Amino acid sequence: MKNIGFLSFGHWTPSPQSGTRSAADALLQSIDLAVAAEELGADGAYFRVHHFARQLSAPFPLLAAIGAKTSKIEIGTGVIDMRYENPLYMAEEASAADLISGGRLQLGISRGSPEQVIDGWRYFGYQPAEGETEADMARRTTEVFLDTLRGEGFAKPNPQPMFPNPPGLLRPEPLSEGLRERIWWGAGSNATAVWAAKLGMNLQSSTLKDDETGEPFHIQQAAQIRAYRAAWAEAGHTRTPRVSVSRSIFALMNDRDRMYFGSSSNDSDKVGFLDEKTRAIFGRSYAATPDKLIEQLKRDEAIAEADTLLLTVPNQLGVDYNVHVIESILKHVAPAMGWRD
């Protein structure tokens, strides 16, 4: 395990029981948590993106702000729903955030998950072309986005421009060189993991995936990763790909930890339906003393296959508590898992 970061869903609610009661709280606390995580030595600060919900939805201002206030930690998403995106404008925004951070952006994208509203992307002005599904639309948008990040000009310049142009066809600006190799695809199935490998994207595998074999979650996820790596090798890419998995992991260090997570009912996989057609398996959470956590995590085949582990954090419990959650894993669990060996 080379890298360990955190993944925040950025929830907020005006409830008095929440430590994150507004959108401003969610954004500003996300910045503070990323700064603190860098000070702890964590490798990454990642954020989930959801629309029409009391969660983080506009990642690039947040990523740019974190990039300006940190110097080492990777910053990224897990994931941006490509059904909602203009690929050219997204390339400009992503490049700007990457340049501000000094090339630390690790951008996770995907087809997206079931949303708060029906066909929410239609309200953003997008719809599948004739004969396309919404998943097809997301993959088409992704391919345009990836092509744009290659940096080749394609737009015919105005013969009488307001400002002088470089020679040849033009491209969106700014463009951050190297960002194309730091795009990750959040794959829900083995087939989309293989598709991502063919296109040269890194792989993000979350705490759920399509239930394709009926086996335990971590075994199915490990098989997905192996299929991805085989497809990567077959495609002939020259660089080594990166693979991340997400887990809810809590070291029970004190009474507060035990109060929040000591009697967790999520210590086994769950099976459900994302929609009327898609049967999904949801991976278990881990909550135990550090010595027991190490034993449990070493039996997780997908963690063993991945190079990056993202710890999902309960952001509404506040920055200080989440710093404690991350620090407990980095100090008392990660070294025994081979972190940075």
Image (cartoon, rainbow, N blue to C red):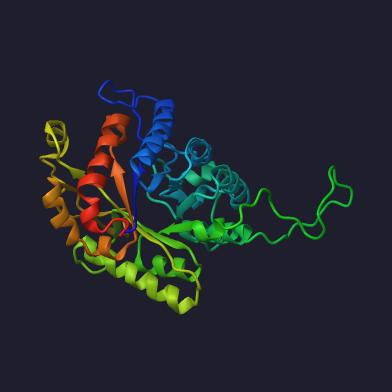
| Residue lying at 48% horizontally and 56% vertically, measured from the top left | 134
Would you say residue 271 is visible in this rendering?
no
- What is the x, y in percent for residue 307? 34, 61
- What is the x, y in percent for residue 311? 29, 47
| Residue sitting farthest toward the top | 16
Q: Quadrant of residue 287?
A: top left
* 240 or 79: nearer the viewer: 240
Q: Quadrant of residue 275?
A: bottom left
* 150 or 338: nearer the viewer: 338
Please state, as top left, top right, bottom left or bottom right, where the C terminus lies in the image. Answer: bottom left
Left-right relation of 100 to 323: right
- What is the x, y in percent for residue 317? 27, 31
| Residue lying at 44% horizontally and 55% vertically, measured from the top left | 110
| Residue lying at 26% horizontally and 64% vertically, measured from the top left | 304
Please state, as top left, top right, bottom left or bottom right, where the N terminus lies in the image. Answer: bottom left
User: Looking at the image, is 301 positioned above or below residue 297?
Assistant: below
User: Looking at the image, is 243 positioned above or below residue 236?
Assistant: above
- What is the x, y in percent for residue 208? 29, 55
* 40 or 287: nearer the viewer: 40
Left-right relation of 124 to 337: right
Would you say residue 84 is visible in this rendering?
yes
Count of number-bearing discs: 0
